[in-house]
Image: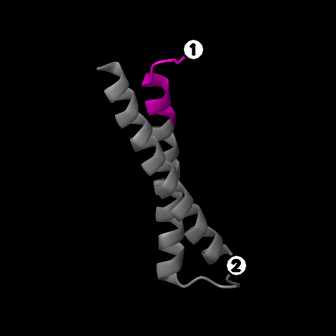
Amino acid sequence: MDEVKGATLSEEIDRLHAEHHRYAQRLEELLQKPYLSTDEQLEEVRLKKLKLHAKDLIYAIERRMPVTV
C-alpha cells in the first residue's frame, strides 16, 4: 500500500517538476525581451506565482513521502 502511495507521490512530483520547468522556460523567454507589453508583464507575475506554488507543492509532497533505506 505504501509503495503505491509512494509511486503516486513520485509521479506527482515529476509532474510538478515538469510544470515548474515550463514556467521557468517561459519566464526566461519573457526576460530576454527588451520590453514587455502590459499583458506580458501580467504573465510574468502570474508565472512567478505559479512557479513558486509548484515548488511549494513539491517540497510539501517530499516531506510526506516515506523514507527509503
Residue 24 falls in image quadrant: bottom right
Q: Is residue 2 left or right of residue 19?
A: left
- Residue 16's spot in the image, x, y percent? 45, 49
At a point 32% along the width and 28% down the height, the residue shown is 4
Q: Secondary structure at mark 2?
A: loop
Whether residue 59 is situated above or below residue 28 in the rendered picture: above
Please say whether residue 66 is one of the residues in the magenta stretch: yes
Residue 69 falls in image quadrant: top right
Whether residue 16 is situated above or below residue 66 in the rendered picture: below
Q: Nearer the viewer, residue 13 or 31?
A: 13
Whether residue 46 is situated above or below residue 49 in the rendered picture: below
At a point 35% along the width and 36% down the height, the residue shown is 8
Disc 1 and disc 2 in contact, CB within 8 angstroms: no
Whether residue 50 is situated above or below residue 30 in the rendered picture: above
Q: Nearer the viewer, residue 64 or 50?
A: 64
Kindly report the distance in space between the C-alpha atoms of the residues bearing marks 1 and 2: 44 Å
Q: Mark on residue 69?
A: 1
Q: Which residue is mark 2?
A: 32
Q: Nearer the viewer, residue 64 or 33?
A: 64
Q: Which residues are magenta?
A: 59-69
Of mark 1 and mark 2, the one earlier in the sequence is: 2
Residue kind at label 2, given as amino acid type: Gln
How packed mark 2 is, by other alpha carbons closer than 10 Å (few <14, some 14-19, many 20 or more), is few
At a point 43% along the width and 50% down the height, the residue shown is 15
